[in-house]
Image (cartoon, helix red, strand yellow):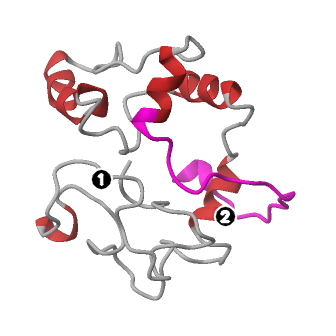
C-alpha cells in the first residue's frame, strides 16, 4: 500500500506478547464482570450495508459462547480491544511489534513460516483457504494447530489465519 512506503528501519524495545489470541471465554469473563463492553453479534458499523451485516453475523463467535469458548473472540472493535487489554493490565502491540512477532523475528518473510510462499491448512486456519481445500468455515480453537516448529514461531500461535 502507498502509506507503507518507503520502507524504513524500526527500533523496537523489548516487549511481551501473549501466546495466542484472546478467547471468547476470556473476553466473556471480562464483560460479565463489567470491565469490558459485551461483544455483539453485529457491531454497529454504520458504513456497512444491511446485507453485509447479515453475511457477517454468523461469523461472530459471540453467537455460540459455549461451543466456541476457546476460539478467538471476534466482532469486537479497536476500542473494545483496548478496554480488554487495560482491564488485564496489558496493551495492544504496536503495528511494528505485531509485524515483528508475526514474522517470527525474521526480516523479509511474508508469513511466519518459511520457505513456503503460500499458506496451507497446516499453517493457518482459514475459511476456504488454499483454494477452498481447508475443511473449515469458521475459526478454530486457539491452539488447534500442532506446534511443529513451522506454524509456531517464538511460541506464539496463529499470527496468520484464524482471525
Q: x%, y% of residue 27?
A: 48, 29
Image: 134 above or below 86: below
Q: Is residue 15 covered in magenta?
A: yes
Q: Which residue is mark 2?
A: 100
- Report the side of 114 relative to 45 (left or right): right
What segment is highlighted magenta in the picture? 1-25
Residue drawn 15% across the image and 69% down it: 131
Q: Label the magenta part by its dominant secondary structure.
A: loop
Q: x%, y% of residue 128?
A: 16, 59
Measure the alpha-carbon separation of dots 2 and 1: 24 Å
Q: Is residue 101 covered in magenta?
A: no
Of 30 and 126, nearer the camera is: 30
- Report the side of 13 relative to 62 (left or right): right
- Mark 2 and mark 1 lie on one chain; the one further toward the N terminus is 2
Closer to the eye: label 2 or 1: 1
Image: 12 above or below 92: below
Residue drawn 27% across the image and 58% down it: 126
Q: Which of the 4 image quarters holds residue 73?
A: top left
Q: Residues within 10 Å of mark 1 (few under 14, many from 20)?
A: some
Q: x%, y% of residue 35?
A: 60, 15
User: Residue lying farthest bottom?
Assistant: 115
Q: Which residue is mark 1?
A: 140
Of 130 and 144, nearer the camera is: 144
Q: How many marks?
A: 2
Amino acid at each position: 500500500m502507498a502509506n507503507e512506503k518507503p520502507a524504513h528501519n524500526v527500533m523496537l524495545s523489548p516487549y511481551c506478547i501473549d501466546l495466542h489470541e484472546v478467547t471468547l471465554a476470556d473476553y466473556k469473563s471480562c464483560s460479565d464482570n463489567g470491565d469490558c463492553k459485551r461483544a455483539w453479534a453485529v457491531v454497529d458499523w454504520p458504513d456497512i450495508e444491511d446485507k453485509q451485516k447479515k453475511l457477517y453475523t454468523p461469523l461472530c463467535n459471540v453467537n455460540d459462547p459455549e461451543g466456541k469458548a476457546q476460539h478467538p473472540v471476534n466482532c469486537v472493535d479497536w476500542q473494545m480491544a483496548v478496554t480488554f487489554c487495560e482491564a488485564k493490565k496489558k496493551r495492544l502491540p504496536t503495528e511494528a511489534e505485531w509485524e515483528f512477532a508475526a514474522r517470527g523475528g525474521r526480516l523479509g518473510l511474508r508469513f511466519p513460516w518459511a520457505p513456503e510462499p503460500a499458506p496451507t491448512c497446516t499453517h493457518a486456519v482459514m475459511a476456504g483457504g488454499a483454494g477452498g481445500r481447508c475443511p473449515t468455515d469458521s475459526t478454530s480453537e486457539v491452539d488447534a494447530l500442532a506446534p511443529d516448529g513451522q506454524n509456531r514461531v517464538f511460541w506464539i500461535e496463529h499470527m496468520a489465519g484464524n482471525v
